[in-house]
Amino acid sequence: MYWYILFVMQQPLLVMFLGSPGSGKSYFARQLAEKIKAVRLNGDSMRMAIYGSVENIDCQLSKDVVNQQTFGAIDYAVEQILAAGCSVVYDAHHNKRDHRAKNEKLAKQYAAVSILVWIKTPYEVALRRGQERAASADQRQHSEERMKESIARHMANFDAPVDGERVITIDGLVDFEKQYDSYLSQLAECMTTSEK
């Protein structure tokens, strides 16, 4: 099966994510992008690039407009990167099935393989991480109340994976090397199953 992993890794990948805030998506995405030599695009980093500071983001009148501009820019970049034959690690919430389906279609258009990585982490751990992590361009630190709101919003807008989606489930409590080993074995299994 190892030869199959090597074959798959020669194809461009579009890696999308499920997982609540604080689950460890960015932790995994950062290291995965480095390991597979992919371009990582992160929603929080793109917001900072567009607006310049957290204060500028927070003072915008419409969060919908902020998100529309942010993810419009990321979606444009995703298409250009896939068109160039490179892999993309799309480090953002992909809760809605229709958005994932759109990205799957885009990946297929450029002969890339779309993968959905679901980082599973207990609620209390995710809640604590969001409060304790250092704020940076690609992640924000929140109060307990803000984290609870963020996780609740995530759960309210969550479409579970459906048959036909290539889903890799990652334990958000283990270190990256264990996560990556699990990712590789599940990737091979996903690809073998999807070709049958």
Image: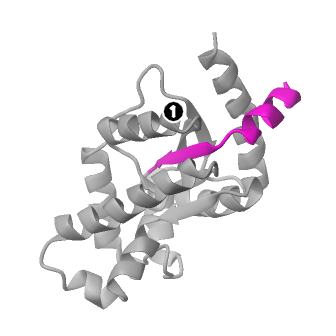
Q: Classify 152 as above or below 171.
A: below
Q: Where does residue 140 sit, x and y in percent of width and height?
A: 43, 76
Residue 154 as seen in the image, left or right of residue 89 = left
Q: Left of 115 or right of it: where is 148? A: left
Instruction: Give coordinates of residue 42: x percent, y percent.
Output: 48, 65
Looking at the image, which is closer to me, 165 or 174?
165
21 to 120, vertically: above or below:
below
Q: Nearer the viewer, residue 71 or 29?
A: 71
| Dot 1 crowding, Cα within 10 Å, few <14, some 14–19, many 20+ | some
Q: Which residues are magenta?
A: 1-19
Residue 17 visible, this angle: yes
Q: Which residue extends farthest right?
A: 3
Farthest front residue in view? 84
Residue at (81%, 27%) from the top-left corner? Answer: 4
- In the depicted view, which residue is nearer to us: 51 or 24? 51
Q: Which residue is mark 1?
A: 108
Note whether 121 is above or below 43 in the view shown. above
Query: Where's residue 141, x and y in %?
Result: 43, 78
Inspect the magenta stretch and tell me whether residue 18 lies in it: yes
Which residue corresponds to the image point at 60% horizontal and 18% vertical from the top-left?
A: 194
The residue drawn where x is 58% and y is 34% is 111
Q: Inspect the image, locate mark 1, and give the three-letter code of the amino acid beneath it.
A: Lys
Query: Residue drawn at (76%, 40%), measured in percent from left and top?
Result: 10
Q: In the image, is residue 160 part of the stretch drawn in magenta?
A: no
